[in-house]
Image (cartoon, helix red, strand yellow):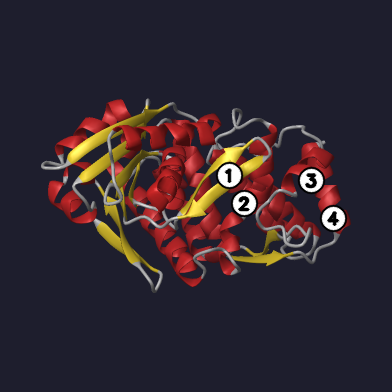
Amino acid sequence: MQTLHVDLGHSRYPIDIGPGLLGDAGLLDARIPGRDLLIVSNVTVAPLYLERLRRSLPGRRVGECILPDGESHKTLATAGTIFDALVAQRQNRDATLVALGGGVVGDLGGFAAACYQRGIACVQVPTTLLAQVDSSVGGKTGVNHPGGKNLIGAFHQPAAVIADTDTLTTLPDRELRAGLAEIVKYGCICDAGLFDWLEINLPRLLARDPAALTHAIAASCRLKASVVARDERESNVRAILNFGHTFGHAIEAATAYTSYLHGEAVAIGMLIAADLSARLGLIDREAAARLRALLERAGLPVAAPAIGADRARTLMQMDKKVRAGALRLVLLDALGNAVVTADYDESALTATLTEYFA
């Protein structure tokens, strides 16, 4: 097991990464506070791992709330079912919500924990690669709206993150590839060495080599923890973590959150952002080509849906990085370094949107 920490100054929490953690009663006893717990999971993950987790929590009063699976269910209505479960089970302010599942469960569970009685503890137990490397860390929670991704939410840091890598053995190949997109993102924005490592070790990751997966997860969490520690509430540098997401979120919203997994949309979004970076002369075409080649080798989509440039731009205007009507974009000035800027040639953006979304 590897243990990292997110240190925010006012609080600090651990990220445990390794095999067999759901069965480690001692670890769970140390990491999950409170007597009263509500485990939030979904219809896919609960049959696989809920009972294993419950057995490792002796002496607790454990309730459960099982949600439907899929990004299309990341809504206020679904969050309402979690509130209903908390109330029905008479959970109080000293209760802890345990989010057992992928990014959707983690976002919904964290959001419900942030709101219920104005805030209860939340422990993230991510079971997908994407959640283990990204969404479980950093305290962003929320639900989608037809007008945009994650428009309703709160910052609510978890008490702990427990990433049991054994859960990746049951992960569908498509979900594994979607998680790889977020690891590629870290290599693009702040670690060229990780990008190089991915180009060499991608076959090991696709084959689910435990050592390679643990290395990639730990590297990703370490990078994200460093960024979050500098900017918890995304007032400046944390925005680089949204590389590819402005375009990707537009793709998800335009397709009603049903056609693409989040990581798939982010993969396309990263390619679009890299293309725009090359048009603007920030990176050379070779760098953009390396990114495309890596994404294609990972089995990720690289073609955007034909939603039209105008529709894409309209959806992008709901991005949370918009300030005073100006859309700030996360671009690359090198593989391994990202910049956040609203100072770009609009004609280059229009040309990029037209090429990809027409």
Amino acid type at circle 1 is: Leu
Q: Secondary structure at mark 1?
A: helix
Q: CA distance from mark 2 to mark 1?
A: 6 Å
In the rendered view of the protein, which quadrant contains the C terminus?
A: top right
* Viewer-closest of 46 and 142: 142
- Mark 3 neighbour class, 10 Å CA radius: few under 14, some 14 to 19, many 20 or more: some
On screen, residue 127 above or below 306 = below
**Residue that carries the numbered disc 3 in the rendered image:** 313
From the top left corner, tell me how far across and down residue 203 is, in percent.
44, 43
Q: Which of the two labelled residues, at mark 2 and mark 3, occupies the earlier sequence position?
A: 2
Amino acid type at circle 4 is: Ala
Q: Secondary structure at mark 4?
A: helix
- Mark 2 neighbour class, 10 Å CA radius: few under 14, some 14 to 19, many 20 or more: many
Pointers 1 and 3 in contact (CB under 8 A)? no
Residue at the outermost bottom position = 9
From the top left corner, tell me how far across and down residue 103 is, in percent.
45, 42
Q: CA distance from mark 2 to mark 3?
A: 23 Å
In the rendered view of the protein, which quadrant contains the N terminus?
A: bottom left
Q: Residue shown at 15%/41% (left/top)?
A: 56
Q: Which of the two labelled residues, at mark 3 and mark 4, occupies the earlier sequence position?
A: 3
- Mark 1 neighbour class, 10 Å CA radius: few under 14, some 14 to 19, many 20 or more: many
Q: For residue 348, which numbered disc appears in the image?
A: 4
* Viewer-closest of 152 and 45: 152
Pointers 2 and 3 in contact (CB under 8 A)? no
**Residue that carries the numbered disc 2 in the rendered image:** 291
Residue at the outermost right position = 347
Q: CA distance from mark 3 to mark 4?
A: 13 Å
The part of the image, by quadrant, that contains residue 267 is top right
